[in-house]
Image: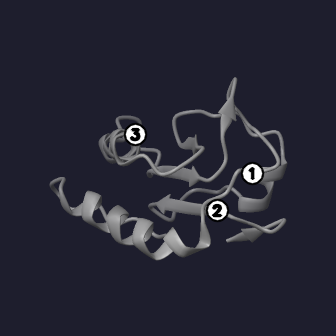
Amino acid sequence: MFINSTFINIFVLNMALPINIQDLIHGHSVEWERLEFKQGWNPEEIIHSICAFANDLHNWGGGYIVVGIAEQNGMPVLPPTGLPQNQLDYIQGELIKLGNQIQPTYIPIA
């Protein structure tokens, strides 16, 4: 996704979430059980979020991990920090690898 000359990645874990991406980023969405903002690519933080969404104890259908936007007090910090464009393919590949490390395999939509 390309917003204001900044590249961010939005990893959607399961498609049944009724949230508009633009509202999520530019609206007044508070971080909660189905939403995680990450300023940059940190595989350890990402796998923890993936596992939390995969456990889905409340059967909410997964969640969103938005990489490239920092979070402060549950709100996105705008403008987004973004991710280097030349690293997007690498990060998406690493995300798939992380999803393959847990059982059952968790396949995100990047």
User: Mark 1 or mark 3, which is nearer the start of the sequence?
Assistant: 3
Q: Residue at x 35, y 72 (%)?
A: 93
Determine which residue is flagged by label 3. Answer: 45
Amino acid type for the residue under numbered disc 3: Glu
For mark 2, what is the residue? 8
Q: Quadrant of residue 30?
A: top right
| Marks 2,1: beta carbons within 8 A | yes
32 left or right, relative to 29: left
Q: Secondary structure at mark 1?
A: loop
Q: CA distance from mark 2 to mark 3?
A: 16 Å
Q: Residue placed at 52% from the left, 35% from the top?
A: 33
- Chain-order first, disc 2 or disc 1: 2
Q: Which residue is mark 1?
A: 80
| Relative horizontal placement of residue 101, taking residue 4 as reference (left or right) | left
Q: Amino acid at mark 1?
A: Pro
State how far apart marks 2 and 1 are (Cα): 8 Å
Vertical relation: 32 (above or below) 10: above
Q: Position of residue 64 (x, y in %)?
A: 54, 52
